[in-house]
Amino acid sequence: MIVADANLVVCLLLPGEHNAVARAWRARHPVWLLPRLWRSEVRNALLGYVRTKQLELAAAQRLMALAERALARGERQVESRRVLELAASSGRSAYDCEYVALAEAEGIELVTDDGPVLKCFPELAVPMVQRD
């Protein structure tokens, strides 16, 4: 079980350089936990692909519905107080710290490709792409 950030979800949904990496994470850790915020972040990422004509709107809608069905059971509420503490002390956004707070509360790793999050929270965050 891992906390998956929105970028990992997007990589799982879309073909591309990191799709195989995301699929490997899913195979090793079939249970992904996510703060409820993930839906908005993934929607926004898919919209970016729509706006740049890399994805049709209908395809984005299908992918979002697929993700919601696959990941809804892993949604968790995070404690606002802790999110704000983490954001205030680290300088990261409250959005980022929702994922961090969830990983901390569950005692599991946060898988992300967000460099500043990896740097600020090395005890919780692990890189999506493992470098040798």
Image (cartoon, rainbow, N blue to C red):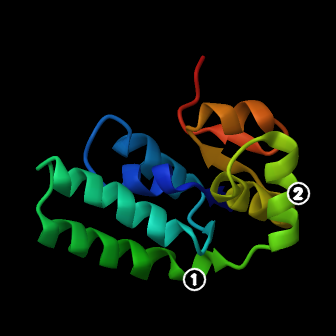
Structural crowding at the residue carrying mark 1, measured as other residues with C-alpha within 10 Å and reported as few (<14), some (14–19) or many (≥20): few
Q: Quadrant of the N terminus?
A: bottom right
Q: Secondary structure at mark 2?
A: helix
Q: Is any atom of residue 64 visible in this view?
A: yes
Q: Residue at label 2?
A: 85
Residue 15: x percent and y percent? Answer: 25, 47
Residue 24: x percent and y percent? Answer: 47, 47
Decide which of 76, 28 is in the foreground and name it.
76
Decide which of 59, 19 is in the foreground and name it.
59
- Residue 47 figure quarter: bottom left
Structural crowding at the residue carrying mark 2, measured as other residues with C-alpha within 10 Å and reported as few (<14), some (14–19) or many (≥20): few
Q: Secondary structure at mark 1?
A: helix
Residue 63: x percent and y percent? Answer: 27, 69
Q: Residue at label 1?
A: 73
Instruction: Find the distance from the CA under tag 1 to the CA under tag 2.
Output: 27 Å
Circles 1 and 2 in contact, beta carbons < 8 Å: no
Q: Is residue 112 left or right of residue 119?
A: left
Total marks in image: 2
In the image, what residue type sits under mark 1? Arg
Q: Which circle, 1 or 2, is nearer the viewer?
A: 2
The residue depicted at 53 percent of the width and 66 percent of the height is 38
